[in-house]
Amino acid sequence: MNYSNPYNNLSAQDQFGHKLVARLSESAAELPHDISERLRAARMQALGQRKVVRFRVPTLATAGGTATLTLGDENTGFWGRIASIVPLVALILGLAALQVIQLDHRAKELAEVDSALLTDDLPPAAYTDPGFTQFLKASREQAK
């Protein structure tokens, strides 16, 4: 018959914890009755004061061809709904800000090209060259 050790699949910390509990349990039988009763009362008091953590299990609600991930019964009220809308509003404002910044950056680049075209004496072939913007950027960096 092959017996397997239940501690084989545990980490070293878990094995140490199990061995410590076993040693303490062995020693607890040797304690006098009054000490064991005080320990039992302290244990009951500690268990009474512990915080119970309740986890809500996400559920998938489907209706009319759409699916929504919810956390069970949500009676969040007015403030809960406001708090759930705030991240969406922040995302929309962030995307709008990025769009404005990119449009501003693009307008500045075009203004640089236009001002360079109007102030420099260049051959007409330079206006159609795809690397002209890169040339302007490189010359601007060298001028700094």
Image (cartoon, rainbow, N blue to C red):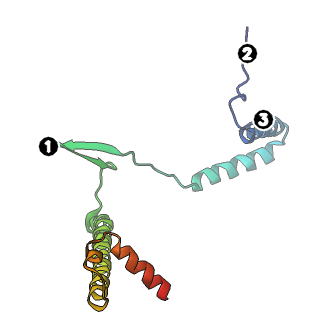
Earlier in the chain: of badge 1 and badge 3, it is 3
Q: How far apart are marks 1 and 2 (CA)?
A: 56 Å
Mark toward the viewer: 1 or 3: 1
Q: What residue type is labelled 2?
A: Tyr
Label 1: which residue?
64
Label 2: which residue?
3
Identify the disc placed on residue 22.
3
Whole-percent x, y for residue 130 in the image: 31, 69
| View extreme (left): residue | 64
Residue at x-position 32% and y-position 48%: 72
Front residue (pair 39, 99): 99
Earlier in the chain: of badge 3 and badge 2, it is 2
- Which quadrant of the rendered structure holds the N terminus? top right
Whole-percent x, y for residue 123 in the image: 28, 81
Whole-percent x, y for residue 136 in the image: 38, 80
Contact (CB < 8 A) between labels 3 and 2? no
